Image (cartoon, rainbow, N blue to C red):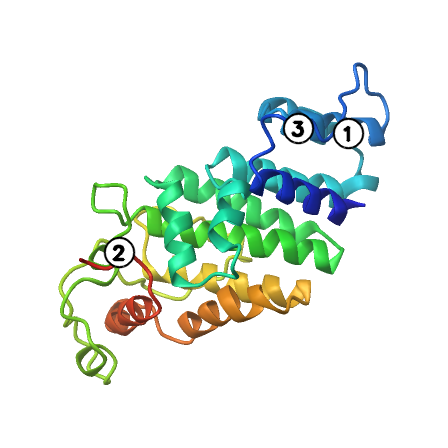
Amino acid sequence: MVQTFFLTLLLALSLGLSSCLNVFAPIDSPSTDYQYISKARACFDEKDLTCAREYYAKASNSFADTRESELAFVELDSSGATMGDFMSAFSGGGGGDALTKFANKMAPGNVTKRQAILSAYRRSLSITDPSLRGLVRFASATALAAEILSESTGGDNIVNRADVVGTGCDATNACAGDQSLICSTSTIVGGAADINLDDTTQTLAGAHDLSMLKAAMSGIIVGLGELGASGKFSTGVGDFATQINAVSATTEDGDCFRFTLGRLSVGIAAE
């Protein structure tokens, strides 16, 4: 039932129907869990996110998985990570080009959006159904990765490759074991240490960095695993995230991480 809802929602949004198709009929005076959920969905369908939050909050813990998963998508939508843009960017499975497209839709990013998406991600931690948990984790981690890139636009609201990678990065000087900062400065700095998004003490406050981006890649991998995903998503965004996640993102050797982002087509290349 819940997964059918999300498939319907994603399809409607990806086809651009959300403004003209009322998928869920509203209920004037909801009083049961089923009615609260239906009312919340109708509000979401109408882009009334305040109303959606209000009625999801009324549902009892018997509907905890439904409430938490659908609230996560409300939070993503309110942060600019709409499922319409997600499906448009990743309809072919995804990779660096798709993530860049999604990031450009979300630009300009900021710490408020970043933390709101993290909040959506952490709703997955209380979801018991593995597939549903994986769906929320995958979608929100992908949105987080795009949001972090959208903070690296250099002022023109476009994620260019030079913004993320810098210039002068190649395999010889970036990934050959020299841990000095060889590449020219990009708009995203290396991280001080690895981050685990499941660790609720991590707030992702302050300036965005490569460790945050790597943590999002890890979330994508875990989410796809819980979903049991195969096909385009597994070989597209899944393989992309796995390659990125294998490289250190800390300050000392962030150059190789940047080079790998560029090699995998993150950011719009210079003409």
Q: Nearer the viewer, residue 88 or 140?
A: 88
Q: Secondary structure at mark 2?
A: loop
Please name the residue shown 27% across and 69% down the image.
254
Asked if residue 97 can be seen in this view, the reply is yes
Q: Nearer the viewer, residue 199 or 86?
A: 86
Query: Residue type at mark 3?
Result: Leu
Mark toward the start of the polypeptide (3 vs 2): 3
Left or right, 72 with reference to 185: right
Left or right, 201 with reference to 35: left
**Mark pair 3, 2: CA separation:** 40 Å
Q: Residue beneath label 2, please? A: 188
What is the quadrant of residue 189 in the picture?
A: bottom left
Query: Residue type at mark 1?
Result: Ser
Frontmost of labels 1 and 2 is 1
**Mark pair 1, 2: CA separation:** 42 Å
What is the quadrant of residue 46 in the picture?
A: top right
Q: Position of residue 42 (x, y in %)?
A: 70, 26
- Local packing at callout 1 (Cα closer than 10 Å; few below 14, some 14-19, many 20+) is many
Q: Residue beneath label 1, please? A: 38
Q: Which quarter shows the N terminus?
A: top right
Q: Residue beneath label 3, please? A: 21
